Amino acid sequence: MVSTIKKNLNLAFRVSSYAEWDKKTNVKMTRPDADCVHSDGFYFFNINIHRTMILIVFEDNEATVIWGGSHDGFNNIFKGNKATIEKWLRTQSLI
């Protein structure tokens, strides 16, 4: 599982390193799978190759991986809804 997540993180960073994302519409143009889950710039990316979800925060043209895991892990932690995601972000002192 860890090696799968590492592979997907590498893939996500290869894609994001070439992107010049300065607004939400640019993210969606490059990555249609991006789901903005909080207005502060938190996104989930669905990396279909290994069924991994990655939450990334964009600040000053930088990306920081906040959470990565399987779809089952995503469903267990975040319950697939933005209110639960926001609560998790608050408990992690990210918002």
Image (cartoon, rainbow, N blue to C red):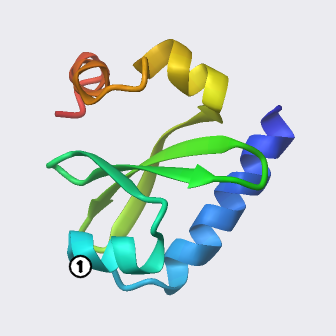
Find residue 92 and report its horizontal and vertical position in percent. Answer: 30, 22
Name the quadrant of the C terminus. top left
Find residue 64 and report its horizontal and vertical position in percent. Answer: 43, 53
Residue beneath disc 1: 22
Q: Nearer the viewer, residue 52 or 59?
A: 52
For image coordinates 83% across by 32% down, the residue present is 1
Kind of element beneath mark 1? loop
For image coordinates 30% across by 80% down, the residue present is 26
25 lies above or below 36: below
Q: Is residue 11 left or right of residue 50?
A: left
37 lies above or below 95: below
Quadrant of residue 23 within the rendered picture: bottom left
For image coordinates 70% across by 62% down, the residue present is 10
Q: Is residue 25 left or right of residue 72?
A: left
Find residue 81 and report its horizontal and vertical position in percent. Answer: 33, 26
For image coordinates 81% across by 43% down, the residue present is 4
